[in-house]
Amino acid sequence: MSDHLRLDKFLWFVRLAKTRTFAQEVAEAGHMRISGRVVDRAHAPVRVGDVLSFPLHGRVRVIRVEALPARRGPAAEARLFYHDLSPPVDVPGMST
């Protein structure tokens, strides 16, 4: 097995993108960072330990890659491949 996976395939395999095409668009939009480096290529390599940060569905997602999937599996399995470090979502009407 390889020590890296294409960015678009990773996003699609772990179900952060519904389609591979959407994953490519997210990767190429120029707003994605891999461990602090701005990337704008769908084929950018993702490795275990990388931290991905990117806007998705109106919020900033920050995830740490825990393992590289070999396929697009069920959602419960997909969540095992990353750890979500995203800031909490603000809920209107809730105060801390």
Image (cartoon, rainbow, N blue to C red):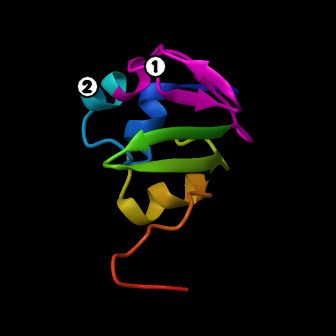
Q: Which residues are magenta?
A: 26-50
Residue 70 visible from this viewpoint? no
Helix, strand or loop at mark 2: helix
Specify whether residue 58 is painted magenta.
no
Does residue 88 appear left or right of residue 72 in this picture? right
Eyeballing the image, is 37 above or below 49?
above
Q: Which residue is mark 1?
A: 30
Please name whichever residue, 36 or 44, is drawn nearer the observer in this view of the structure: 36
Q: Residue at x 50, y 59 (%)?
A: 79
Q: Residues within 10 Å of mark 2 (few under 14, many from 20)?
A: some
Q: Which residue is mark 2?
A: 21
Residue 14 visible from this viewpoint? yes
- Residue 34 horizontal/vertical position (percent): 63, 30
Eyeballing the image, is 80 above or below 51?
below
Helix, strand or loop at mark 1: loop
Which quadrant of the figure contains the N terminus? Answer: top right
Please name whichever residue, 19 or 39, is drawn nearer the observer in this view of the structure: 39
Q: Residues within 10 Å of mark 1 (few under 14, many from 20)?
A: few
**Amino acid at dot 1:** Gly
**Amino acid at dot 2:** Thr
Q: Residue at x 50, y 49 (%)?
A: 61
In terms of image quadrants, where is residue 35? top right
Contact? badges 2 and 1 (CB < 8 Å): no
Residue furthest right as drawn:
49
Give the label, 2 or 1, closer to the camera: 1
- Residue 42 horizontal/vertical position (percent): 44, 18
In terms of image quadrants, where is residue 38? top right
